[in-house]
Image (spheres, rainbow, N blue to C red):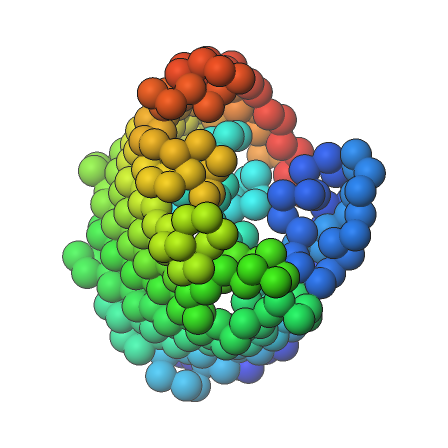
Amino acid sequence: TEKGEADLGFRFDTILPGSDYRFTLARGLWDDQTGRYGIDPVQFYAELYLPDVAQGLSVKLGRFFAPYGVESIAAPDSPLGSRSYSFSYNPFTLTGALANLKLSDEWSVKAAVVTGSDAFIDPACSATFVAGVIWTPDKGDTTVDFTTILSDGRFDQRENFHNPQIFDVVVSRKLGEKTTWKLEALYGFTNDVLTIGYSHWYGITNYLIHQLDEKLSTTGRLEFFDDIQGQRTGTRGLYTAGTVGLNYRPANWLSIRPEVRLDHNENRPFAGKATLFTATMDVIVHW
């Protein structure tokens, strides 16, 4: 195929306003908001694409979603309306420069230098690096995506700020024309946490996505998240959660996604209970 021309663009995404802004705010960027509803510019970056470098090089400069995992802050980019523990209790966004280089049809690499995990510009920021490799054998039927986020790995006690080390791998496999299986395995740790010292956690999340017809698909998610010291969630122990959801698209501009979910942890983190059942639905308008 012929290579295209170099391209330069810009992207801006914001929670404007929203009650969930408090979960994604970056340290040092409008983080003094205290109201129920607030604003978070979750992405704003310039991106340069150079098609003649290997098989294509893209470079982002600004604030962007952390480039790992299966799920996203953006609802249309996530398989279900609710999010997994591995997504909810690990970095959301990074600020700096991120490069993605396609070396061949099978191999791509990524690298970034950023100010920190969920940090903009702040005294608590610690220089952080991202490295990763993507392998796509079998003409695209399988993808293996490994990413690591490397910082000093220390909890800044004076600034009360979390600088984690993250190691994440996602394996995606097509199981026929209509079914896809995805597995994410994540491990993270931080040193010097108050009253804990060394804190670490891991998650294993399975997704099974099946297209029933052109308008309806179903997703099952089974996850295990062990917050060994309780530093991430506030309650230590193994969280197990099973979720089943539907994605109905009666029109190209509309998605309706009901789901049911069951969570369990023997240490009773759910208002004193070990088990939590939820039934939810989200509606997405595409444009």
Camera-side residue: 178 or 191? 191
Q: Is residue 59 visible?
A: yes
Image position of 265 with respect to 227: above or below:
above
For image coordinates 46% across by 43% down, the residue present is: 232
Residue at the left extreme, as displayed? 138
- Quadrant position of residue 283: top right
For image coordinates 79% across by 34% down, the residue present is: 36
Q: Quadrant location of the C terminus?
A: top right
Q: Can residue 87 be seen in this view?
A: no
Residue 30: x and y, percent? 77, 56
Residue 244: x and y, percent? 39, 21
Residue 214: x and y, percent? 43, 28
Looking at the rendered structure, the number of numbered marks drawn on it comes to: 0
Residue 92: x and y, percent? 54, 52
- Quadrant position of residue 56: bottom left
Camera-side residue: 274 or 4? 274
For image coordinates 46% across by 48% down, the residue present is: 195
Image position of 83 with respect to 43: above or below:
above
Residue at the front extreme, as displayed? 195
Residue 45 horizontal side relative to residue 205, left or right:
right
Image position of 60 with respect to 245: above or below:
below
Q: Quadrant location of the N terminus?
A: bottom left
For image coordinates 54% across by 72% down, the residue present is: 126
